[in-house]
Image (spheres, helix red, strand yellow):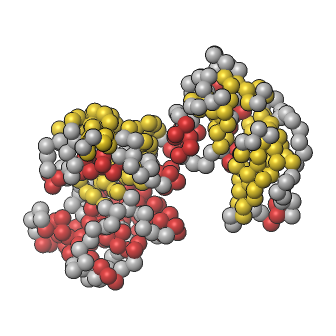
Amino acid sequence: MTDSEKEIRHSESRSLGANGVSVGINNISKSYGKIPVLKSIRLNIAPGEFLTMLGPSGSGKTTLLMVIAGFVRPDNGSLEIGNVEAIRLPPHKRNVGMVFQSYALFPHMDVFSNVAFPLSIRRVANEETRRRVEVALAQVRLSGYAQRRIDQLSGGQRQRVALARAVVFGPRILLMDEPLSALDKKLREEMQIEIRQIHQDLGMTTIYVTHDQREALTMSDRIAVMDQGTIVQVDTPSALYRMPQNRFVAEFVGESTLLPVSVCQRGSDVSFAGQRLKIAKHNITKPSPHSTLLIRPEHVRIARRVTGEGGTDTNCFAGTVSHKLFQGDQLLLRVTLAGGQDVLVREAATHAAAGNSLEVGEKVSLLLDREDSILVPGSGL
């Protein structure tokens, strides 16, 4: 796309009239029978923010999205959309666009009629409807597809139609419930970039639900990690990855190895298997006698010689290569330490590295810089 095409697309998108508003979720709870699904959820979302609710199946993220959309009534709590209490507002009066996991397109309608549907129920004039549909289709790169039947479209094109339908009436909030889960990896990654670009063009508040942590890290301004009906951490992608506040977040967001460590009461002395560890003070979130050392696979360097100790600012762990997996651009190695703990290590699978590749059974040292050594509250020794 040329710079002039981008400017035209951005200019046209503003004509949809989308404006982001704040969303305030205050003490929202929901149970089905005796099973609690949401437990006193509190979350503030800024106008125009792209916030992702990330969590495993059953964590409550989709239920919370349905509460915001108006399809689920919570047992208690309040919901403010643009500083207006919305709990009792029906869905069609909340001015919220929705993209469902199944797309929920009308198979008997063509693309134009599907995208125009929200405008028809709002009794928008025909000429204005045509203009808005053309702008929305251009926004999702489907100009020229207005007369296509839904069964003539690929999965990615159907997803774009659903997105165009969700934004065509200029909603204040866009809600998306795992919209990319049915797409293959390459198309899913392309659509992540597209959705993020559309969000930036339109400026509407976007709340996105996924169980894919890489997707959340790629697209979001902030991520709210959910587990068993509660929000366990809300942070920027980089802060969430670098400084998880508990063991669940550390294990769920990104690949990780967690080693049990001993921590003195003041948190200044941390040891593993009798070896004192070097950890930067800002990497110790909540000093606790029950903590774990978080190791990301990409932070570890491997040395063939077993040294037993690192440099002034480096931690060193002796182990044996127990597994090696070729993954195209990378090698994933599993190194087993003397105490039986396994540490994952990633290395670039370059041609030069292939000639010097480690083999299963080799003795090695793992080197981890103090800046990459992160202490996480949780179950330790």
Residue 36 falls in which quadrant of the image?
top left
Measured as percent of width and height from the top left, residue 241 is found at: 56, 42
Between 174 and 43, the one lying in front of the other is: 43
Measured as percent of width and height from the top left, residue 71 is found at: 21, 52
Outermost residue, top side: 266
Residue at 46 percent of width and 60 percent of height: 192
From this view, report whether residue 359 is shown above or below residue 244: below
Residue at 85 percent of width and 46 percent of height: 364
Residue at 40 percent of width and 38 percent of height: 231
Q: Is residue 256 left or right of residue 79?
A: right
Q: Is residue 350 left or right of residue 35?
A: right
Does residue 204 appear in this view? Answer: no
- Badge count: 0
Measured as percent of width and height from the top left, residue 363 is found at: 87, 48
Outermost residue, front side: 34
Measured as percent of width and height from the top left, residue 86 is found at: 18, 42
Q: Is residue 233 left or right of residue 342?
A: left
